[in-house]
Image: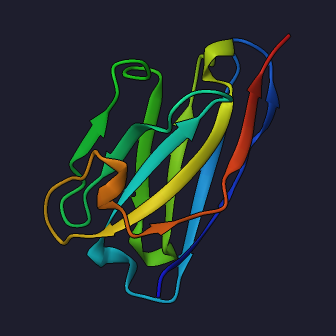
Amino acid sequence: QLKLVESGGGLVQPGGSLRLSCAASGAPFDYYVIGWFRQAPGKERDIISCISASDGTTYYADSVQGRFTISRDNAKNTAYLQMDNLKPEDSAVYYCAADRKPWGLAVRDYEYDYWGQGTQVTVSS
């Protein structure tokens, strides 16, 4: 059973940066695709980015392409989401999730079996 814990959220001004972390425990981390999702009040949960288990292949939603960077350190059982040039519309609860899938990516939330508790990101002046 994989457990995920996010950290790194907070309040930041427009144009600022945050780095979210997703710490995993309980199962071999390097068997899992890791995805980052976000959900704003009254909106659906959307995928932002994901990274493959094996070769570091990545996916980004158009809304964050060029501003966010996903990475993982399998030795530390941790994935990261570096968020730069943040905008007010980036405000949401951010979740990391894991899908046991040794190869390829997963871009739909129903593909993911394990979820963290979420961390709030607020972009405001």
Q: As displayed, is residue 25 above or below residue 106?
A: below
Depicted 73 relative to depicted 119: above or below: below
* Side of 37 where 4 appears, left or right: right
| Residue 103 image point, x, y percent | 13, 65
- Residue 68 shows up from this direction: yes
Q: Is residue 3 above or below residue 89?
A: below
- Which image quarter: residue 113? bottom left
Give the tally of numbered discs.
Answer: 0
Q: Residue at x 71, y 49 (%)?
A: 119
Residue shown at the point (37%, 22%) measured from the top left: 65
Q: Position of residue 118 (x, y in %)?
A: 66, 53
Give percent across and percent down for residue 80.
52, 52
The residue nearer to you, when weighing 42 against 68, is: 42
- Among the 4 quarters of the image, the one containing residue 72: bottom left
Q: Residue at x 33, y 32 (%)?
A: 60
Could you tell me which residue is drawn at 32 percent across and 67 percent down?
A: 99
Is the image coloured rainbow, by chain, by secondary structure, or in one colour?
rainbow
**96 above or below 65?**
below
Q: Position of residue 71 (x, y in %)?
A: 41, 50
**Direction left: furthest residue:** 103
Quadrant of the frame with the C terminus? top right
Q: Which residue appears farthest toward the front when viewing the image?
A: 42
| 38 to the left or right of 11 | left
Which one is in front, 113 or 104? 113
Q: Is residue 87 visible?
A: no
